[in-house]
Amino acid sequence: MKIGVFDSGIGGLTVLKQLIKNYPNNEYIYFGDTLNLPYGTKCINELEERSDKIINFLLKEKVDIIVIACGTISSNLYKQLKDRYEVPIIDVLTPTLKYIREENLEKIGVFATPMTIKSGFFNEVTQKSVSCPLFVPLIEERKIYTKECDNAVIEYLEELRGCKNIILGCTHYPILKEVISKYSSANLIDMGYCVSKYINITNEGKQKVTLYFSLLSDELTNNISSMLDIKYNIKEKIV
């Protein structure tokens, strides 16, 4: 089975990693739109234009299913994109809600991008929500283990005081799990794990992983190699 996965940058690799862990015997095509990140502050029209271009690229690669590994696009455009294309499209938020309900989790907060918070997607299950515009740039610029990152985490956690569970509502954020856990004992909900738990795909064939990014750099390739301990091909591709 050929599975397409896309995000604004390296965040979606947290979803890809979980999928490969549970379903290793597939071909994966990943697209990270690093030339146009971050997505979390873009308007709907911009997000829709980027999504359409990336999905059409993945369709040319003949994928059997597409995973939107981006909380911002999932929260704002999933229904439109799902209805627009014949290929099955999976978002990261719906499986996360399913997981929360099945586990009967309470006292839930969410870290997410400004556009995901604005969508109100998590309002029915969360007590508090925090927009975290600083996180994605810190992650993409490899500033995770810095005082600047610690300060941002501490600032955002203060707004979720009293929450026993925190949804990492952007797929970049699991990269900060170690830092967040230094300052909070809350259970961190990884959307990539939730997707891999509920997605309906086969596990037959030979593993092949191809990563496309709209802008490559040495910093990016170093980031990727620190995240993925599998064999992959990496290419630059503007769509």
Image (tube, rainbow, N blue to C red):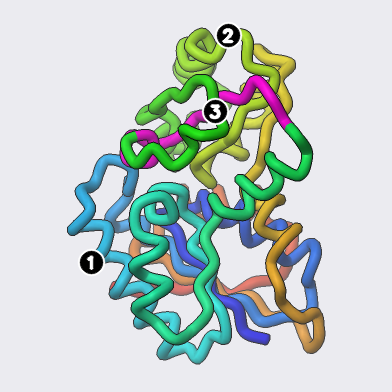
Q: Residue at x 44, y 31 (%)?
A: 135
For disc 2, the marked residue is 161
Q: Identity of the amino acid at label 1?
A: Glu
Q: Tag 2 or tag 1, which sits nearer the N-term?
A: 1
Task: Return the residue nearer the eye: 107 or 153.
Answer: 107
Residue 60, relative to residue 234: is it above or below? below
Q: CA distance from mark 3 to mark 2?
A: 13 Å
Quadrant of the image occupied by residue 161? top right
Q: How many marks?
A: 3
Task: Return the residue nearer the eye: 204 or 13.
Answer: 204
Q: Is residue 125 left or right of residue 226?
A: left
Residue 57 position, x and y percent, is: 37, 81
State the mark number for residue 49.
1
Is residue 198 in the magenta section? no
Is the Cβ of the residue at disc 1 closer than 8 Å to that at disc 2? no
Q: Which residues are magenta?
A: 105-117
For disc 3, the marked residue is 126
Task: Return the residue nearer the eye: 88 or 156.
Answer: 88
Residue 160 position, x and y percent, is: 54, 14
Question: Which one is in front in this view, the residue at disc 3 or the one at disc 2?
Answer: 3
Quadrant of the image occupied by residue 59? bottom left
Say which quadrant the C terminus sits in.
bottom left
Q: Identity of the amino acid at label 2?
A: Arg
Q: Is residue 84 left or right of residue 225?
A: left
Q: Identity of the amino acid at label 3?
A: Thr
The crowd level at tag 2 (other Cα within 10 Å; few <14, some 14-19, many 20+) is few
Assign a secondary structure to mark 3.
Answer: loop
